Amino acid sequence: MPRAKSIIAIDGPAGAGKSTIAKLVANKLKFLYIDTGAMYRALALKAKRIGADLEDSKLITEIAKKTKIKLKYKNNKLTVILDGENVSKEIRKPYVTDDVSEVAKIKEVRRIMTILQRKLAKNDNCVLEGRDIGTVVFPNARYKFFLDADFNERAKRRFVELKAKKEIIKIKDVSNNLSKRDKIDSTRKIAPLKRAEDAIYIDSTNLSIKEVTDTVLAWIKA
């Protein structure tokens, strides 16, 4: 198991605000930020581009083995490189979001991604956010947080986020996708979404971004 004394793990469901908080915390502490969800999104994008059957676990696993994913975080901006191509914006499109959980539930895909995530975090102080950072990827992380929020609030946040990107989408579609992802993420057999026993639980439903960030930093400094 990799050394985890400088690892901050932030887990939680989609729309809870993990990415936003993780970026702010990493920036404040001068830590490397690793968005593990972006890695699964990149793989899902590649699979969809070539018309692969997302339910064919063997095929998706083979694609994952031949895929190169790099994450670069500079000046508060995350760049996701898929086989040499910058796909940072494309992986956030609804058509990718719709199916990313299907790819992420495959056992061998998660094994491949876990190895890559540990490699990325090997030499730096890091903030990683995802679904299984504190339970599987870095179970010995020094700091673990589980960020949650009311379902309707999460759907609203995701809808506002997509509208800001000028995506044409309905709140009903966002809610349906979120419900689907919650079910897949929390019921999959491999590395399901769940709170680590020693993770600090934060309900962000009625908290501002600053309040959540300050809460995380306060626990770390304490």
Image (cartoon, helix red, strand yellow):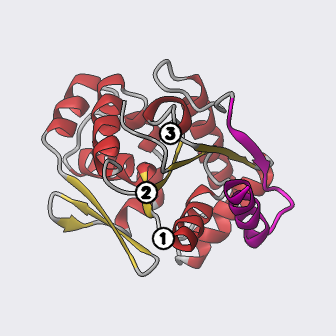
Q: Residue 167: percent from the left, percent from the top? A: 52, 71
The three-letter amino acid code for the residue at tag 2 is Asn
Q: Which residue is tagged 2?
A: 125
Element class at badge 1:
loop
Element class at badge 3:
helix
Q: Residue 206: percent from the left, percent from the top? A: 87, 60
State the quadrant of the C terminus. Answer: bottom right
Residue 204 is a magenta residue = yes
Please give the range of residues in magenta.
198-222
The three-letter amino acid code for the residue at tag 1 is Lys
Q: Is residue 198 left or right of residue 64?
A: right
Q: Could you give the CA–CA distance between mark 3 and mark 2, rounded to whole angstroms?
A: 15 Å
| Viewer-nearest residue: 127 or 113 | 127
| Viewer-nearest residue: 45 or 130 | 130
When asked about the image quadrant of residue 211, the answer is bottom right
The mark nearer the N terminus, 2 or 1, is 1
When asked about the image quadrant of residue 100, the answer is top left
Q: Are marks 3 and 1 in contact (CB under 8 Å)?
A: no
Q: Could you give the CA–CA distance between mark 2 and mark 1, rounded to whole angstroms?
A: 8 Å
Residue 170 in sight here: no
In the image, what residue occupies the spot 77% across and 49% down? Answer: 202
Q: Residue 183: percent from the left, percent from the top? A: 62, 31
- What is the total number of numbered labels drawn onto the structure image? 3
The mark nearer the N terminus, 3 or 1, is 1
When asked about the image quadrant of residue 81, the answer is bottom left
Q: Is residue 112 above or below residue 57?
A: below
In the image, what residue occupies the spot 67% across and 55% down? Answer: 220
Check disc 1: other Cα within 10 Å, few if <14, some if 14-19, many if 20+: few
